[in-house]
Image (cartoon, rainbow, N blue to C red):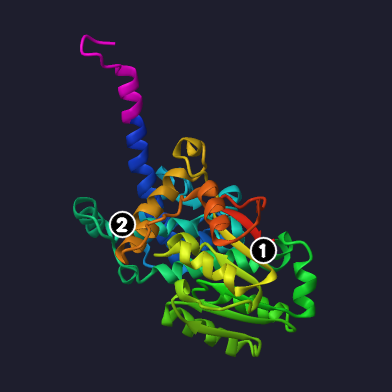
Amino acid sequence: MTERGLDHAKSEAFAERMVDVLNTAAIALLTSVGHQVGLFDALAGLPAATSRQIADAAGLNERYVREWLGAMVTGRVVEYNPAGATYTLPPEHAAWLTRAAGLNNLAISAQYIPLLASVEEPIVACFRHGGGVPYSAYPRFQRLMAEDSGAVHDAALIDTILPLVPGLVERLHAGLDAADVGCGRGHAINLMARAFPNSRFSGYDFSEEGIAVGREEAASWGLTNARFEARDVATLDLHSQYDLITAFDAIHDQARPAEVLRGIAEALRPDGTFLMVDIGASSDVGENLDHPLGPFMYTVSCMHCMTVSLALGGAGLGAMWGEQTARRMLAEAGFASIEVKRIDGDLFNYYYVATKR
């Protein structure tokens, strides 16, 4: 320590940390770009290749691809051979960056970084004056969420997630009434409706655009047991109508989450089940110090989930509301039994299975 009480070693270590933050943020931005334009997929299908060969394989402009590759090489994502000026995406990296990686494709989530950056200025204003940034300020959000959750649901909904509820798959085959609250573009509803033709499925969301996409997909699949309705899920006003209600990463975004949960409890039949998938975390920040996605999730919460709720004069619950708060709110809504389950490989979510008795 100096006479001023400054630990220079600690200070220099923090400076190195901040330099790493800047580099990592830059890599995140270009990872998003690489995913959107198909560069990781193209690289994964090529042997060692020049920037021209990679650009041609992806159908892109070589000059932009070359500069992108410079960031990926210095960021240790892509490997470079100076002898032939060739680039390679190692299979160990492709396993986490390509569409073929399915649930493991972290490049999908990298798209949240530029999405959130697009609202930086209004977020700064909210820090100074309160209020929130409205949902309409995120025109890409629903499409990105559809891609993100769609990958999960395509891979795991029918065979992994629904079986978390004992006996549910058998009941779905036999036929029951189910709803998805905050269904977005309705892909989960349509997947379930296709897998369980004897059951009837309803999707509710305030977004007319999302509901329209769900209806179009249902029509293209020839589904007759899936319906969609645009409505405020805080005012469901349904009584003992459903055997199963699902909510996939939707409750924490709500302006009035307590009312939504009470409405879900009322809409369930006495022996019905609520399957709530939401961000896996503690309500105590001190218990999230080792969370593998802690900084990312608090940032997403601050710059989207919390602020869109506050923009509506809502609770501003945020993505990191955590297990303790979720359990309390579920109990207050009328659920007597609450189990929390995990799925191997899912870094993001807890799976709440709640019943009224």
Q: Is residue 87 left or right of residue 190?
A: left
How many marks overall?
2
Mark 1, secondary structure of its residue:
helix
Q: Position of residue 114 (x, y in %)?
A: 35, 58
Magenta region includes residue 5 = yes
Q: Is residue 315 left or right of residue 155?
A: left
Q: Quadrant of the N terminus?
A: top left
Magenta region includes residue 192 = no
Q: Is residue 357 left or right of residue 301?
A: right
> Label 1 crowding class (10 Å Cα cut-off): few <14, some 14-19, many 20+?
some
* Residue 270 seen from this side: yes
Mark identifier at residue 117: 2
Q: Quadrant of the C terminus?
A: bottom right
Q: Are marks 2 and 1 in contact (CB under 8 Å)?
A: no
Mark 2, secondary structure of its residue:
helix
Q: Determine which residue is flagged by label 1.
A: 156
Q: Position of residue 59 (x, y in %)?
A: 44, 71
The boundaries of the magenta stretch are 1-15
Vertical arrangement, residue 24 with respect to residue 3, above or below: below
Q: Position of residue 48 (x, y in %)?
A: 54, 53
* Residue 53 seen from this side: no
Residue 234 or 27: which is nearer the viewer?
Answer: 234
Residue 215 or 155: which is nearer the viewer?
Answer: 215
The amino acid marked with disc number 2 is Ala
> Label 2 crowding class (10 Å Cα cut-off): few <14, some 14-19, many 20+?
few
Q: Residue at x 58, y 55 (%)?
A: 331
Q: Quadrant of residue 22?
A: top left
The amino acid marked with disc number 1 is Ala
Q: Earlier in the sequence, mark 2 or mark 1?
A: 2
